[in-house]
């Protein structure tokens, strides 16, 4: 596992910082102190779709699994490197759902991405363990066919469908296609 984390930290650019303001050098120091779980958490906090490759996220997922820790988030981020990043502000229509939506990407509703074009995308609820019926949250979407989402831009409205009527309405707050640079990474 330490080898997996060392390989992952080697992929972090020298000028990259985690959300906590830590650098790759800080992560290496935690690895020297055998603080593997903390090092993994820090590596998971680095942002930057440009340098974070599929390999990077696979290394973190494998390290988490070797430590018997949850790896779903790392697998999710690995998929974003291949499929692109779509974040939306989702409002569930009151009464349309009876049960909450769990955080971890198990729900795969249909989304009208424009002109009645319904596409499947998995959902990851950010910053809460679940999205309650009638609630609102920022969610990440993994599109099964990312080319059909390519036209989306910040501010676009899309709708979530599970069964008639519409289950939710969402506003795109961030879209980064495959191979594109995230604005904060520029």
Image (cartoon, rainbow, N blue to C red):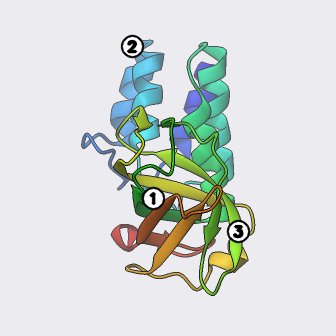
Secondary structure under tag 1 reads loop
Q: Position of residue 166 (x, y in %)?
A: 54, 64
In front here: 100 or 84?
Answer: 100
Q: Position of residue 147 (x, y in %)?
A: 71, 78
Residue at the disc numbered 1: 48
Secondary structure under tag 2 reads loop
Residue at the disc numbered 2: 33
Say left or right for 119 vs 19.
right
- Inter-mark Cα distance, 3 to 1: 27 Å
- Mark 2 or mark 1: which is in front? 1
**First reached walking from the N terminus: tag 3 or tag 2:** 2
| Quarter in which the N terminus is drawn | top right
Which quadrant of the view contains residue 179? bottom right
Q: Are marks 2 and 1 in contact (CB under 8 Å)?
A: no
Say left or right for 32 vs 102.
left
- Mark 3 or mark 1: which is in front? 3
Q: Residues within 10 Å of mark 3 (few under 14, many from 20)?
A: many
Residue at the disc numbered 3: 119
**First reached walking from the N terminus: tag 2 or tag 1:** 2
| Quarter in which the C terminus is drawn | bottom left
Q: Position of residue 117 (x, y in %)?
A: 69, 79
In front here: 91 or 43?
Answer: 91
In front here: 51 or 89?
Answer: 89
Secondary structure under tag 3 reads strand
Residue positioned 45% across, 37% down in the render: 43
In front here: 22 or 150?
Answer: 150
- Inter-mark Cα distance, 2 to 1: 26 Å
How many numbered circles are shown? 3
Q: Does the rendering let one see residue 75? A: yes
- Mark 3 or mark 2: which is in front? 3
């Amino acid at each position: 596992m330490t080898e997996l984390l060392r390989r992952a930290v080697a992929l972090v650019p020298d000028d990259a910082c985690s959300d906590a303001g830590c650098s790759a050098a800080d992560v290496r120091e935690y690895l020297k102190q055998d603080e593997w779980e903390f090092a993994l958490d820090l590596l998971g906090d680095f942002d930057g779709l440009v340098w974070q490759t599929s390999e990077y996220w696979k290394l973190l997922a494998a390290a988490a699994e070797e430590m018997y820790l949850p790896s779903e988030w790392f697998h999710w981020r690995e998929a974003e490197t291949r499929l692109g990043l779509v974040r939306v502000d989702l409002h569930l229509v009151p009464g349309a759902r009876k049960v909450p939506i769990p955080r971890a990407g198990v729900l795969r509703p249909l989304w009208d991405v424009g002109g009645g074009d319904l596409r499947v995308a998995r959902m990851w609820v950010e910053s809460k363990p679940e999205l309650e019926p009638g609630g609102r949250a920022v969610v990440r979407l993994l599109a099964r066919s990312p080319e059909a989402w390519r036209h989306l831009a910040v501010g676009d409205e899309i709708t979530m469908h599970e069964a008639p009527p519409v289950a939710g309405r969402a506003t795109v707050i961030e879209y980064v296609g495959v191979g594109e640079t995230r604005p904060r990474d520029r």
